[in-house]
Image (spheres, rainbow, N blue to C red):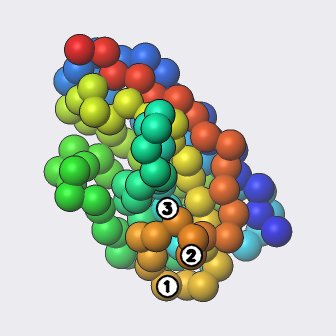
Amino acid sequence: QVQLVESGGGLVQTGGSLRLSCAASGRTFSTYTMGWFRQAPGKEREFVATIARSGGGTYYATSVKGRFTISRDNTKNTAYLQMNSLKPEDTAVYYCAADGSGVVHTTPWNYDYWGQGTQVTVSS
C-alpha cells in the first residue's frame, strides 16, 4: 500500500515555473515506477511524464518534452515535476501515481496508486 500526496500547485503566469512534489508513504517507494498525469475540465486524464524505479529512465508526453522534468529522490520517498515555460494549455489538476509492475507505462490504468491531485493554473 502506498499513499501519495501532491503539493506545489498554484497560479502562475504564462512563461512561469512551478515545481510539484509527490510525497509517498511506506518504505517501498523505490520499487515503484512513478508517473505524473493531468486532467483539465471536460477532458480525459492524460499522461505527462514517468520515471523508472531507479530514476535512470524517463519518458515525456510530446506536449511537455523540453519544458518539464521528472525526477525522484528515493531517500526522501518523493517524486518531482519541474515545470518551466508554462502555457495556459498546461492548466489542469496534476496527479502523481505509482505503478508496482516495474515497467514504464504511459496509460493511467496501469498505475496502482494515485494522489488527490494539485491544481495548476496558468494565466495568459
| Residue closer to the observer: 56 or 90 | 90
From what the image shows, is residue 55 above or below residue 75?
below
Residue 75 picture quarter: bottom right
Name the spot of residue 92 as percent of width and height, x first: 44, 35
Mark 3–mark 1 Cα distance, whole angstroms, equals 11 Å
The crowd level at tag 1 (other Cα within 10 Å; few <14, some 14-19, many 20+) is: few
Name the spot of residue 30 as percent of width and height, x first: 62, 73
From what the image shows, is residue 114 above or below residue 53?
above
Mark 1–mark 2 Cα distance, whole angstroms, equals 9 Å
Identity of the residue drawn at 67% across and 70% down: 112
Q: Which residue lies under the disc numbered 3?
A: 35
**Dot 2: what SS?**
helix
Q: Which residue lies under the disc numbered 2?
A: 110
What is the quadrant of the C terminus in the image?
A: top left
**Earlier-in-chain disc, 1 versus 2:** 1
From what the image shows, is residue 39 above or below residue 62?
above
Identity of the residue drawn at 64% across and 79% down: 100
Residue 105 picture quarter: bottom left
Q: Which residue lies under the disc numbered 1?
A: 103
Circle 1/circle 2 CB separation < 8 Å? yes
Name the spot of residue 90 as percent of width and height, x first: 32, 35
Identity of the residue drawn at 36% across and 18% down: 12
**Earlier-in-chain disc, 3 versus 1:** 3
In this orientation, does residue 75 appear? no
Q: What residue type is labelled 1?
A: Val
The crowd level at tag 2 (other Cα within 10 Å; few <14, some 14-19, many 20+) is: some
**Dot 3: what SS?**
strand
| Label 3 vs label 2, nearer the camera | 2
| Label 1 vs label 2, nearer the camera | 2
Q: What residue type is labelled 3?
A: Gly
Q: Which amino acid does label 2 sit on?
A: Asn
